Image (cartoon, coloured by chain):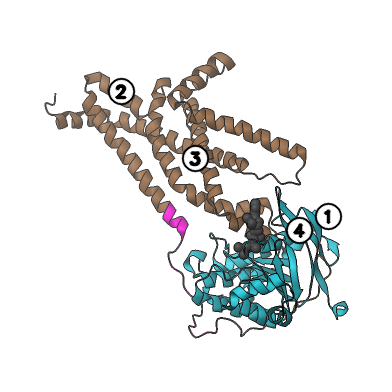
Amino acid sequence: MPTTFFGWVFFLMEEYGPVLLTGAGVTLLLAVVGTFIGCLIGLVVGIIQTIPMEDNDSTFKKATIKLTQRLLDAYVEVFRGTPMIVQAMVVYYGAMSVFNIDMSPMFAGFFVVSINTGAYMAETVRGGIESVDPGQKEAAIAIGMDHFQIMYNVILPQALRNVMPQLGNNLIINIKDTSVLNVISVTELYFASKSAAGVYYKYFEIFFLTCVIYFIMTFTASRLLRWVESKMDGPKDYQLVNYDPMADPCGHVPLPTKKQKGRFD
Amino acid sequence: MAQDRELLVSVHDLQKAFGEREILKGISFDIYRGDVVCVIGPSGSGKSTLIRCINYLEHPTGGDICYRGESVMKHFKKLTQFRTKVGMVFQSFNLFNNMTVLENCTVGQIKVLGKSKEEAKETALRYLKHVGMDSYVNAKPHQLSGGQKQRVAIARALALEPEVLLMDEPTSALDPEMVGEVLRVIRDLAESGFTMVIVTHEMAFARDVSNRVIFIDQGVIAEDDAPDVLFKNPKNPRTKEFLGRFQQ
Ligand SMILES: Nc1ncnc2c1ncn2[C@@H]1O[C@H](COP(=O)(O)OP(=O)(O)OP(=O)(O)O)[C@@H](O)[C@H]1O
Ligand SMILES: [Mg+2]
């Protein structure tokens, strides 16, 4: 048996490395898939939350929008306002006793992480949409675009760029917080570590390893997202086309004569 | 003389209130093809509100706006077409920050007018050239100066080939050295016969470029006349007082 701290660490690494790595794989899978689905949920909810009410909309349309928005508000508040560890218990055991559904722990895990991330991302997306300066929306209205066109072409591309840092944040949080799913026996990294530590009673040594693995995962995720963000921003500078510094800033080209057109065509 | 000119937009007894506060209290005037109408008036008199009501960014609370004799307020379905006929240039440019200069000028043509990409690009380039911004097609708005942004915004509005261009203080957000380049573009448009309604605080410019000046005070048209008359011999004492402030 090893005698030093690092001796034990290396010994356990050889012995339990594969188990920990499998756990890490499960953690990553839960975090990535959960964040992805959560973002989709958040996107949809955030978009619905920011649908404007027009004066000339029908009462039915207004009522439907209002009701949907209230329900989604409730969803956001409930899932932001309760711990994920408790949600995991409620979903896993609740499904069994109330609906008689015996879902696998893994499925319950995906469900809880997605729905939880969705609640956070909904608020983030709403904020991202509202942070795009309203002048651009007015300009888009003024050139005749409708709400959907404005959202798709003008607002969302900017809103999504603005929520990228928060998306990264959520991914990192999820990599760490999926550890709470050990309460419903999801065999993610924390669960695997605990099992491994119990064999030789070497908690510190195992969890030192676990710590390193978590950090490698979060750090990689963080750098990867930075890189994606910089890709989204496009080139920092632009090339002038046919640059001519002496060009008269206006004039030269006569305004094309306009064809007379019928009304409103 | 007015009979043989083509009536584009007419504003009838336009009213706008924000809650209890009446901002516009019945404004009427007609815009004919080739008109360059400058709207002047003290701050808070409702000039922006007027311009924004004409293109329905604000919903008027009374009166009517007609395009070629047809009420726009009663035919909401035609609002989109109306908006493509009546372009708008904002004080704060309001370019789409996620798009390049070229895309800013093509998106409306493609999405609203249904033009093909190539066609839209060709038209956009023509107008960008007109405002002297054709070399900047690949730039993003945040990489441009204020004057350049406003020139792109003008090209964006022109690219839809509107019949009337509304401008709300197009040079007020600019540093003094950039005002000239934008005014030159507008002057050039005026000289080529383009119909415009311009809210401005540049009195000398208004006098030069317009064929008609409307002085708005406290939500009504206090005076509406040719620039020579309005600037040299204002009839309304309030106009006199307002112009007096600019002469010092
Ligand atoms: N959305 C709004 N809600 C309430 N009041 C408003 C709103 N928009 C404008 N107002 C008020 O309407 C009045 C007229 O505003 P407006 O912007 O039309 O003035 P303006 O003539 O353009 O002034 P300026 O020369 O400073 O641009 C102001 O007193 C303003 O406070
Ligand atoms: Mg104003």
First reached walking from the N terminus: tag 4 or tag 1? 4
In the picture of the structure, the residue carrying the numbered disc 4 is: B25
In this view of the protein, which residue sits in the foreground, B202 or A204?
B202
Q: Quadrant of residue B29?
A: bottom right
**Which residue occupies the extreme front position in the image?**
B237
Q: Is residue B97 among the parts visible in the rendering? A: yes
Write the start and end of the magenta stretch as one range. A229-248
In the picture of the structure, the residue carrying the numbered disc 1 is: B74
Quadrant in which the N terminus of chain A is drawn = top left
Give the cyan chain's letter. B
Q: Amino acid at mark 1?
A: Lys
**Callout 4: helix, strand or loop?**
strand
Residue drawn at (19%, 32%) of the image: A10
**Which residue occupies the extreme left position in the image?**
A3
Q: Residues within 10 Å of mark 2 (few under 14, many from 20)?
A: some
Q: Which numbered tag is attached to residue A194?
A: 2
In the picture of the structure, the residue carrying the numbered disc 3 is: A36
Q: Is residue B112 among the parts visible in the rendering? A: no
Q: Which numbered tag is attached to residue A200?
A: none
Q: Amino acid at mark 3?
A: Phe
